[in-house]
Amino acid sequence: MQKIKEERTLVLIKPDGVKRGLTGEVLQRIERRGLKVVAIKMVEVGRPHLEDHFPKTDEWVGRLGDKGLKTFNDYQLDPKDVMGTDDRMEIGKKVKESLFAYMTSGPIIALVVEGIHAIDMVRKVAGHTLPVFADMGTIRGDYSVDSPAVANVEGRAIYNIMHASETPEEAQNEINLWFKPEEIHIYKRADADVMF
């Protein structure tokens, strides 16, 4: 049980979230869920750090391309008109470059969040990664309406405010990449005994 209560996840408030002044809102919603922030810092990252953060596989680049092609299909857009190609790997590489440009466009707030089912809870609070499909009441649903179709046509990444780890393995790898062990704190929330 203790392991479930102390699950950790990485949260990044992306440059659009920081620039729009949503840091406090993101923190408030996480803490109101009974989760606690055990590490926090503002950083500006370069390409080498992002290369370590994102998967380095052709499979991942292909998935980015597949998502782009699906968006073009869903919105009846011609990928050749928009991106100059309909090759999934070429589209994936272009999406990756726009993602890197986005993530290096300003400061990021990096957090380690801990608590019961922290990974799932933070992802629920964040909402769907594509803001246009995020439910009202989630961070993305309340504060973004960005669309993959618009982002692809404009040649940029989707502005979706935040990142949250998807799996325990991903969370551990990302936490180790973004934080040193001595930057992560252990403490008890005052309301912990009442909540669980």
Image (spheres, helix red, strand yellow):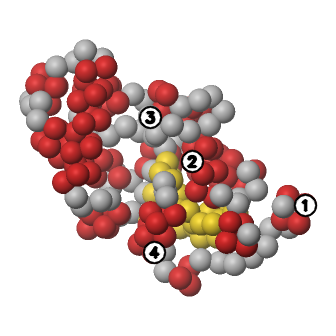
Inter-mark Cα distance, 3 to 1: 35 Å
Mark 2: few/some/many CA within 10 Å (<14, 14-19, 20+): many
Residue 96 image point, x, y percent: 24, 48
Mark 1: few/some/many CA within 10 Å (<14, 14-19, 20+): few
Please determine whether, in this image, residue 76 is positioned above or below residue 117: above
Inter-mark Cα distance, 1 to 2: 24 Å
The mark that comes first in sequence, 4 or 3, is 3
To which residue does mark 3 refer?
130
Residue kind at label 1, given as amino acid type? Val
Q: Do the CB atoms of the residues marked 4 and 3 lie less than 8 Å apart?
A: no
To which residue does mark 4 refer?
176
* Outermost residue toward the bottom in this view: 182
- Element class at badge 1: helix
Quadrant for residue 112, please give it: bottom right
To which residue does mark 2 refer?
123
- Element class at badge 3: loop
The mark that comes first in sequence, 4 or 1, is 4
Q: 106 or 164: nearer the eye?
A: 164
